[in-house]
Image: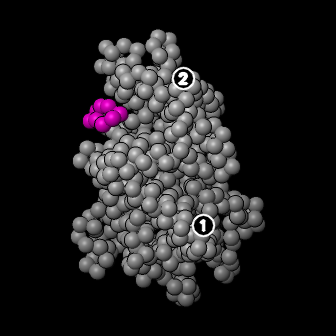
Amino acid sequence: MLALFTLLPQRIKTAQKGKFTVIVFLVLVAAAFLFADGLLTPAISVVSAMEGLKTINPDLEVLVVPLSLIILAGLFAVQFKGTDKIGKIFGPVMMVWFLVIGGLGLFQAIKLPEVFQAINPMHAISYIGHVNLHIFVVLSCVILSATGAEALYADLGHFGKRPIRIGWFAIAGLTLVSCYFGQAALILNDPKYIGNSFFGLAGEGIGSIVLVVLATLATIIASQALISGVASISSQAIQMTLLPRMKITHTNQGHQGQIYVPFVNALLALGSIALVLIFETSAALAGAYTFAISGTMLITTICVYWVAKETWKLNPFLLYPTIAFFLFVDIALVVSTATKVFTGAWLPLLIGVSLAGMMWLWRKGRHHLGEEMVATAMSMSELENVKNKGDVNVYEGVGFYMSARSDTLPQALQEQIRLLKQMPSQIVVVTVRPVDVPFADSEPEYIEINPHISKVIIDNGFMESRNIPEALRHSSLKSKFDESKGIYFLTDRTLIRKKDFGLNPSEEVIFTALHRNAAKASQFFNLPDDRVMAFDIKMNV
């Protein structure tokens, strides 16, 4: 969702007021829904797999919740190790899973070939005519057959469009449809399987045991996909200054996309475990789960419309009918899942609005903070005047000054001059510049302002976190300075309330709390602890 957001024109992405702010907020809500999905998917997936124990022995039902909690706790506990090694078995396990459920479904469907008539869409249209408005209740359940589609594009940036399309049309889509046909045939032949048609495909005995084990493995892998997806979205949101800085660990140095965000992982773990304890069954979780998915789908369609119109300049005769079709489907699904607002859909709605509001507030606060920094920044001429007066001791050495903006002098340099009355002979202003691509392959940009002051601009994709010392050791910069001998100068800001900051009192409290608990810049940018000097400054908010 955030990757799609980066394709929007700059005037929409940076809007602080007006109609475009609605688009920005909707994107934040969709991103928040995906966070909710990251909570719900592990919970509902693992619980639904464990519910297969009832088909083996009804007395095992008491183990569903305890075993689900153990599996979830173990899954989140190993996230810090990454999925590089264990991920190699994900593909074969999922291939076996799809072939097994597809084969079991086909075996049952052949016994009652009439079920294949469901391919004809006229039967669905006729059904709608018979049930009228009750169709919305039906759709709120039918959407469960489409959930998981959002996970397909969670790894789009890692695999590309072609493998995902082939994987869906050649394997996943076909076997899932076959499985659904088989369940329909099984119920029509023997109504006792209503409510347990999936595990009923394997019959009783060893077959049901094997299917429960296989389902457990598949749901763990499906949960991992969403956990990894939420970690990626969190990283993107941080890079796009929609969330405060957090510690991000790369679990595989050879693969930029494999990351671990401890704080987010802890929230997902606690949330998923709490959901299992509160809802206990997959049926109870379904209402919350489907609303998050349908909401994400609707907002994605709206965002695609604006990207297609403003960025791609798509032909209106092609754009409008296409978007209208998807809006019709998405709105129908949102309305249908909203019927469950009192039985579970309230949860993702609460998470979505709350988290989106927090991201909006952080974005707004950072904007005002940036304006305050520009207003109080020292100009180049002021720096030269101070230096020429001889009030400042210029010592031999290199100083790296981290700055969010490349067009102003860093606050750390101003504080060094004000407090210590000194500055290095070589000043390097380092700015990390966000770019609208997943991973930036460009080399650092070096700009010499004068013999003593230069700027280094490091491009940063929205799916990566930069190691600043490593970037400054780039071959193109070796002739300019020696990174290993430089000192990094930073500022730690303490916010002081100011009436005209642009936030109301309650917003100020939340923003200040978020700012106070954000990860330190030295930690976020992987700076060496023994070569960092931080100045504590007070800023009016």
The verdict on residue 279 being magenta is yes
Query: Residue at image x 56%, y 33%?
Result: 178
Disc nearest the viewer among 2 and 1: 2
- Say the numbered circle drawn on residue 177: none
Which SS type dominates the magenta stretch?
A: helix
> What is the secondary structure assignment of the residue under circle 1?
strand
Residue 69: give x, y in percent of width and height.
Answer: 36, 28
Q: Quadrant of the C terminus?
A: bottom left
Density class for disc 2 (Cα within 10 Å; few <14, some 14-19, many ≥20) is few
**Vertical arrangement, residue 377 with respect to residue 178, above or below:** below
Residue 442: give x, y in percent of width and height.
Answer: 70, 64
What whole-number distance in Å separates the C-alpha atoms at marks 2 and 1?
A: 56 Å
Tell which of 363 and 517 is nearer to you.
363
The verdict on residue 76 being magenta is no
- 241 displayed left or right of 92: left
Residue 247: give x, y in percent of width and height.
Answer: 47, 50
Amino acid found under the numbered disc labelled 1: Val
Amino acid found under the numbered disc labelled 2: Lys
Can residue 514 be seen by looking at this rendering? no
Region rendered in magenta: 277-284
- Say the numbered circle drawn on residue 435: 1
Q: Earlier in the sequence, mark 2 or mark 1?
A: 2
Can residue 331 be seen by looking at this rendering? yes
Q: Which residue is mark 2?
A: 111
**Vertical arrangement, residue 108 with respect to residue 308, above or below:** above
Tell which of 222 and 48 is nearer to you.
48
- Total marks drawn? 2
